[in-house]
Amino acid sequence: MKQYVEFNISKKSNATIEYVLKMLASIMETIIFMFMGLSTVSDHHSWNTGFVFITLASCTIYRIIGVLIFANIANRWRLLELKLTDMLIMSYGGIRGAVAFALALILDESKIPRKKEFVTATIAVVFFTVFLQGTTIGPIVKYFKIKRKEIEEPTMSAKLTNRLIDHIMSCLEDIAGVAGKHSLRDKIR
């Protein structure tokens, strides 16, 4: 919808919508990962090492194949073609988690008796992609000298949104009785 909406609203409204949607996406991602963390420690799991490793390998291999196929198809119409290093980063950096975890949870155990193995393997894939691939993507991008987006000066809307989030976090820390990074700043003020 961005290509239709962006030209029909003002620049300030566009920035506001962009940051509100980013904030909502961040909140939803946090909720999903909190739920997954709770499921990781509170549910009973069925660990099958072979199935977990085959799942990890399959996800990685098919992600690479999918990116290569679709990137090469897209390159036919792109003005700036994707290079092999771009495709590598797209393959390596693709975090597969929230949707796969939700789909594994809604499996019917009466029809699929090994549901717990699917959930456990999905959690293992998510942890692998988030922690191993997520922490190593930065050095890989630097090694291949891939051009990154330049940091822009935040708009007034972005500054206000960030300030709102800071106040909400301070409030939540006060309610929870936790002294975080916001409480020290508030004491100084």
Image (tube, helix red, strand yellow):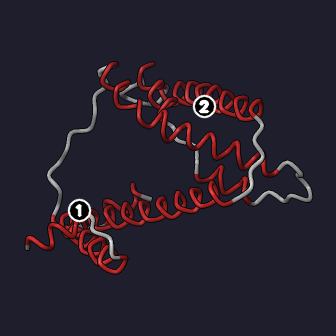
Three-letter amino acid code of the residue under disc 2: Arg
Image side of residue 172 versus residue 75, left or right: left
Front of the two marks 2 and 1: 1
Q: Which mark is residue 181?
A: 1
Number of numbered discs on residues: 2
- SS at circle 1: helix
- SS at circle 2: helix
Question: Looking at the picture, does residue 69 appear above or below residue 173?
Answer: above
Residue 16: x and y in percent read: 28, 67
Residue furthest to the left in view is 189
Residue beneath disc 2: 63
Residue 152: x and y in percent read: 17, 48
Please give the name of the residue rendered at 66% of the width and 27% of the height, measured from the top-left corner. Answer: 57
Considering the image in quadrants, where does the C terminus appear? bottom left
Residue count near mark 1 (Cα–Cα under 10 Å), binned few <14, some 14–19, many ≥20: few
Three-letter amino acid code of the residue under disc 1: Lys
Q: Which mark is residue 53?
A: none
Please give the name of the residue rendered at 58% of the width and 44% of the height, measured from the top-left corner. Answer: 126
Q: Quadrant of residue 108?
A: bottom right
